[in-house]
């Protein structure tokens, strides 16, 4: 009798408990999931180019020209944080070879500059400022060095890795290591003043990546063969769709990079790198060409809103400050973005679905409203085109919808549509391809008391972690 009672209790406990679905295709690593959560962070291009008015230095620039008059890393980090950026990546060494830290392996560094009488360390000041303001710090180290005499020779690889080791061991936690794709060409090269070419295997990326993994295991690597891929342009937009999966290639295809590859072999999401000005480095002739808050919002929707990240460049001027026009535009954009996300107009809604995996409340429709990144609505394996309905407490007006998939299970949804109930009938107001980390729809204002998400096509049962409604002004209009 006791055994029967235990069996009844066990069966009652297990009733309604369903197994999570199997992952589909390539899936993100733990470090990639942490990177996805950032979405928006900044690039800092600052070197001798700032003082020569160039974009690419030749490599013969004397360190004495690098002398910012009012440098303040804290001010730069504070502006980035106020705008909503989650981190900063500093060009510790650009193609000209000048190092913003006192590297033990070269004299072509900040130690030979008049700034702080050669005793400064700009990488240190940026790293400390980021920590002080609660944002992350990343490093850019150009593989191409137009100053070094041994570039394109085996000895340079040892030099390069020694410098990489300095950056990855001397400045605390690094969230991203950025390897530029610009490689080989003419340069000073220790006075040779010639053109040098390299082979695809020259850098020995496998060993270089292994060094990053050893020293900064939580850092993502930006590279054509790394954790994060280039989006294929520097204009500020990801493709529509922009799949997070990709099949890495030695020879880059800009179109493929822009849209990704559905069912690619690797989880290699796109990063959209773009500058707030026409150039990557500061030029006073561009002071009237700073992107407006509205333009920055467009970039956000065309990058983060398509599942990529937005890496926005903020070039310090010759003072070592973010120019006032850049800061003003960036902060105004950040305020609009914060206001938009500040109110979720789906709050208080009741959620239902045409199918819930195993009838288990752990996968119920309500999961899309709980604000938790580790919960999700999911259907049974055979239910590939389920529907989810949000019944709002009253009619509400929105012009932005945020959809998110539960990424540890892969990118599962191919096509989706959104409907609003108007005068008792469903009317479609949006549709698209792919969801991924975040899919933002923005359009004409919709007023309704019910919203329906229809999964039109999926490679595996969908796992949706968020359906949120927003108004771009940040206020609900009723």
Image (cartoon, grey):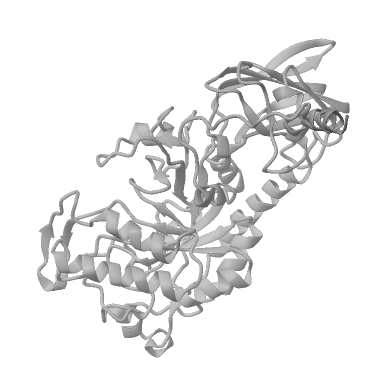
- Residue 53 is drawn in which quadrant? bottom left
The answer to whether 314 appears left or right of 233 in the picture is right
Query: Residue 375 in the image: x percent, y percent?
Result: 70, 39
Q: Is residue 361 above or below residue 456?
A: below
The answer to whether 81 appears left or right of 173 in the picture is right
Q: Residue at x 42, y 73 (%)?
A: 169
Q: Quadrant of the N terminus?
A: top right
For the residue pair 221 and 132, the one nearer the viewer reads as: 221
**Is residue 355 visible to us here?**
yes
For the residue pair 286 and 66, the one nearer the viewer reads as: 66
- Residue 360 is drawn in which quadrant? top right
Query: Residue 402 in the image: x percent, y percent?
Result: 67, 34
Q: How many marks?
A: 0
The answer to whether 17 appears left or right of 45 in the picture is right
For the residue pair 475 and 308, the one nearer the viewer reads as: 308
Q: Quadrant of the C terminus?
A: top right
Q: Is residue 47 above or below residue 84?
A: below
Q: Residue at x 46, y 41 (%)?
A: 269
Query: Residue 241 in the image: x percent, y percent?
Result: 49, 28
The answer to whether 468 appears left or right of 252 in the picture is right
Q: Residue at x 30, y 51 (%)?
A: 181
Q: Is residue 334 above or below residue 458?
A: below
Residue closest to the far front: 1
**Is residue 48 visible to us here?**
no
Query: Residue 205 in the image: x percent, y percent?
Result: 27, 54
For the residue pair 330 and 406, the one nearer the viewer reads as: 406
């Amino acid at each position: 009798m006791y055994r029967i009672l235990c069996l009844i209790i066990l069966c009652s406990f297990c009733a309604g408990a369903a197994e999570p679905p199997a992952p589909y295709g390539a899936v993100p690593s733990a470090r990639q999931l942490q990177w996805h959560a950032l979405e928006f962070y900044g690039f800092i291009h600052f070197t001798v180019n700032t003082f020569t008015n160039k974009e690419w230095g030749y490599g013969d620039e004397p360190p004495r020209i690098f002398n910012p008059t009012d440098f303040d890393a804290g001010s730069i980090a504070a502006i980035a944080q106020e705008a909503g950026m989650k981190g900063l990546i500093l060009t510790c060494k650009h193609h000209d070879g000048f190092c913003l830290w006192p590297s033990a392996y070269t004299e072509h560094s900040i130690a030979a500059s008049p700034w702080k009488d050669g005793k400064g360390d700009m990488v240190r000041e940026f790293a400390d400022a980021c920590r002080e303001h609660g944002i992350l710090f990343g490093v850019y180290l150009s593989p191409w060095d137009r100053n070094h005499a041994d570039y394109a020779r085996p000895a340079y690889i040892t030099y390069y890795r020694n410098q990489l080791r300095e950056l990855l061991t001397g400045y605390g936690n690094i969230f991203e290591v950025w390897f530029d794709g610009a490689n080989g060409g003419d340069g000073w090269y220790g006075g040779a003043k010639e053109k040098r070419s390299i082979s695809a295997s020259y850098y020995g990326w496998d060993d270089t990546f292994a060094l990053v993994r050893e020293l900064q295991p939580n850092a993502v690597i930006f590279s054509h063969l790394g954790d994060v891929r280039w989006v294929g342009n520097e204009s500020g937009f990801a493709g529509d769709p922009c799949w997070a999966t990709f099949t890495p290639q030695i020879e880059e295809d800009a179109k493929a990079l822009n849209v990704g590859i559905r069912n690619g072999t690797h989880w290699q999401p796109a990063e959209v790198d773009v500058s707030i000005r026409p150039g990557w480095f500061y030029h006073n002739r561009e002071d009237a060409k700073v992107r407006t808050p509205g333009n920055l919002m467009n970039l956000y929707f065309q990058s983060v809103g398509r599942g990529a990240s937005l890496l926005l460049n903020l070039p310090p001027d010759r003072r070592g400050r973010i120019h006032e026009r850049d800061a003003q535009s960036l902060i105004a954009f950040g305020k609009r973005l914060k206001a938009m996300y500040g109110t979720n107009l789906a709050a208080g809604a009741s959620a239902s679905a045409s199918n819930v995996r195993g009838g288990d409340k752990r996968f119920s429709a309500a999961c899309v409203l709980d604000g938790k990144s580790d919960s999700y609505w999911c259907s049974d394996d055979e239910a590939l085109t389920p529907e989810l309905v949000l019944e709002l407490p009253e009619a509400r007006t929105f012009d932005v919808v945020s959809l998110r998939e539960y990424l540890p299970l892969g990118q599962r949804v191919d096509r989706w549509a959104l409907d609003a109930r108007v005068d008792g009938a469903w009317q479609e107001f949006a549709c698209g391809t792919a969801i991924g980390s975040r899919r933002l729809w923005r359009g004409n204002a919709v007023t309704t008391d019910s919203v329906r998400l229809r999964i039109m096509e999926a490679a595996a049962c969908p796992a949706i972690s968020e359906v949120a409604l927003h108004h771009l002004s940040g206020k609900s209009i009723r």
